[in-house]
Amino acid sequence: MREILDKIKGMLEEYKPRDTALSEIKKKENWDPFKVLIGTILSQRTKDEVTSLAVERLFSKFPNAEELSKANVEEVSYLIKPVGFYHQKAKNIIKVAKIIMEKYGGKVPRNIDDLLTLPSVGRKTANCVLVYGFGEPAIPVDTHVHRIFNRLGLVKTKNPLDTEKRLREIIDKKYWIEINDLFVRFGKSICKPQRPLCDICKLKDICEYYKANKGYKANKGLGCNFLG
């Protein structure tokens, strides 16, 4: 696993794709679990650049759970627009802030079972909070992580939940915290859902899908098309 992560790092350093929205939040907000939680909810079905602008506007007015718990839905909707489903997300993040204030004393829980009880929080979001908010080992699996591990042939799974379960079984815990950020940026810039850049990928030698398609689309630089 170390070799795979290092090769992905090398490609990202060479091609320099932008940071993910969560990585930007982590850096700007110094591992603030609340802002990571809210940012992750806003990022659902939303492009990173839109998420980044939305969280910047939101946190400039409501920087913590206490302030957001008292917010007006219409004002929050205005601040986070145009993230996907912005009005529903505004309602949900206010609910989240209220629950955190009332049940957890203003602090985001760092237990995944408690996180999963919050509105709009599934396993990927909960794991993102653990990784980006608390710096704890977890494997947030989105479509990019799911797709790439299947393309490489390291797992044979049908959905992100099954992928997370399998990865937890086969990957040493010391590598978990690195996986999401590296694989998401790699998946957006090189191992894309449609027409991945197989010809420049340094994982070709271990990639089952590339091996199955070399001499056809992959070698022509047209990419591959699997689980996309």
Image: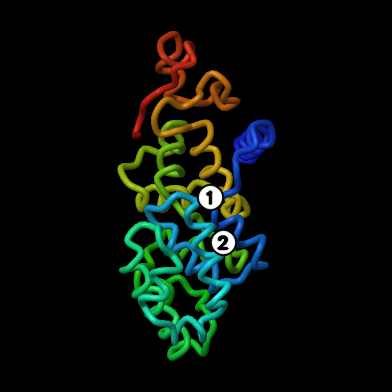
Q: Are marks 1 and 2 in contact (CB under 8 Å)?
A: yes
Q: Secondary structure at mark 2?
A: helix
Q: Considering only order in the chain, which callout, 2 or 1, is on the residue closer to the N terminus?
A: 2
Considering only vertical position in the picture, is 104 above or below 158? Answer: below
Identify the image quadrant of residue 185.
Answer: top right
Query: Dot 2, how many residues are within 10 Å of its Cα: few (below 14), some (14-19), or many (20+)?
Result: many
Residue tagged by mark 2? 131
Residue located 47% across and 31% down the image: 152
Q: Does residue 208 appear anywhere in the picture?
A: yes
Residue located 44% across and 25% down the image: 208
**Near-viewer residue (179 or 191):** 191
Residue located 36% across and 29% down the image: 226
Q: Amino acid at mark 1?
A: Asn
Point out residue 65 in the picture as x, y percentages from the top left corner.
Answer: 51, 81
Considering only vertical position in the picture, is 205 above or below 62? Answer: above
Q: Secondary structure at mark 1?
A: helix
Tell me the quarter of the image containing the N terminus. top right
Residue tagged by mark 1? 180
The circle on residue 28 is none
Point out residue 91 in the picture as x, y percentages from the top left corner.
Answer: 34, 75
Query: Dot 1, how many residues are within 10 Å of its Cα: few (below 14), some (14-19), or many (20+)?
Result: many
Tell me the quarter of the image containing the C terminus. top left
Q: Amino acid at mark 2?
A: Val
Is 105 on the left-hand or right-hand side of 46?
right
Residue located 49% across and 46% down the image: 170
Question: Distance between the Cα atoms at labels 1 and 2?
Answer: 9 Å
Identify the image quadrant of residue 5.
Answer: top right
